[in-house]
Image (spheres, rainbow, N blue to C red):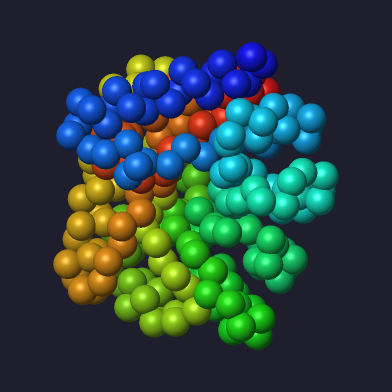
Amino acid sequence: MSSVAEHLAIIHTKIAAACMRSGRRETSVELMAVSKTFPPTVIQEAVDAGQTLFGENRVQEVLGKIPQLPSHLRWHLIGPLQSNKVRKILPHVEAIHSVGTLSIANDIQRIADELGIRPTVYLEINLADESTKHGFAVKDLPAQTEELFSLDRLEIQGLMCIPPFDPDPEKSRRYFTQLRQVRDQLEAGANRSLPGLSMGMSHDYHVAIEEGATIVRVGSAIFGGR
Ligand SMILES: *Cc1c(COP(=O)(O)O)cnc(C)c1O
């Protein structure tokens, strides 16, 4: 077994344990393999182990990799998207996790309308209001959700967050709880369903699952250090 395959097997075991602890079905959580900076040969090892969902954070990088890998793979963009790249990336990814401004949401709406598609997106929430991070500030959401939810080309699947990094995974817990609560409030306020919670990375995905993550974004625990 390749080391990538071994890592994937370990992660699946830990995902199953976290689901068991929190009374969730294993099928309610999907593992995204974050393959940024890794070449197609390494990604192929994950594919050989059965992984089909991959996350990348740069448009150029993912567009370069897609043609070099099997066509059944599903790609999600998890890094910030610039307005001038929307048209290029939309046809190639299954979802965008990093919609963090009204302006980019409107760009996606306009181009998706031209292309006749309904892209799946997650709203990135900047929970700790960190100036270095992208995403909607929680305090700004009430003023922005009406416009966001009026963008009828956007299949808003749910919310995404990247908590402030702390090596202690328990330190992430309150952010994951908060993302779920913000989601619950939005659902109640807008009377629509936002089932997706994209949260949890290599060091804290087990905590994220306990708090309701539906998709965990795991990179270095699968592929090694970058
Ligand atoms: C790189 C990245 C990840 C994965 O991080 P690891 O710590 O390597 O698991 C997850 N989400 C986003 C948005 C990233 O940029």
Q: Quadrant of the N terminus?
A: top right
Where is residue 157, by image quadrant?
Answer: bottom left
Q: Closest to the observer: 52 or 77?
A: 52
**Residue 221 shows in this picture:** no
**Residue 4 shows in this picture:** yes
Relative vertical location of residue 20 with respect to residue 215 in this rendering, above or below:
above
Relative vertical location of residue 11 with respect to residue 102 in this rendering, above or below:
above
Which residue is depicted at the point 57% across and 30% down?
219
- Relative to residue 65, is residue 29 drawn left or right? left
Where is residue 20, by image quadrant?
Answer: top left
Which residue is depicted at the point 72% across and 52% down?
71
Give the image location of residue 158, x and y in percent: 37, 58
Relative vertical location of residue 155 with respect to residue 176 in this rendering, above or below:
below
Give the image location of residue 47, x and y in percent: 65, 35
Give the image location of residue 203, x and y in percent: 44, 22
Q: Quadrant of the C terminus?
A: top right
Where is residue 12, by image quadrant?
Answer: top left
- Relative to residue 180, is residue 82 drawn left or right? right
Q: Count of labels shown?
A: 0
Which residue is depicted at the point 50% across and 45% down?
133
Give the image location of residue 192, x and y in percent: 26, 71
Q: Closest to the observer: 221 or 98?
A: 221
Q: Closest to the observer: 213 or 163?
A: 213
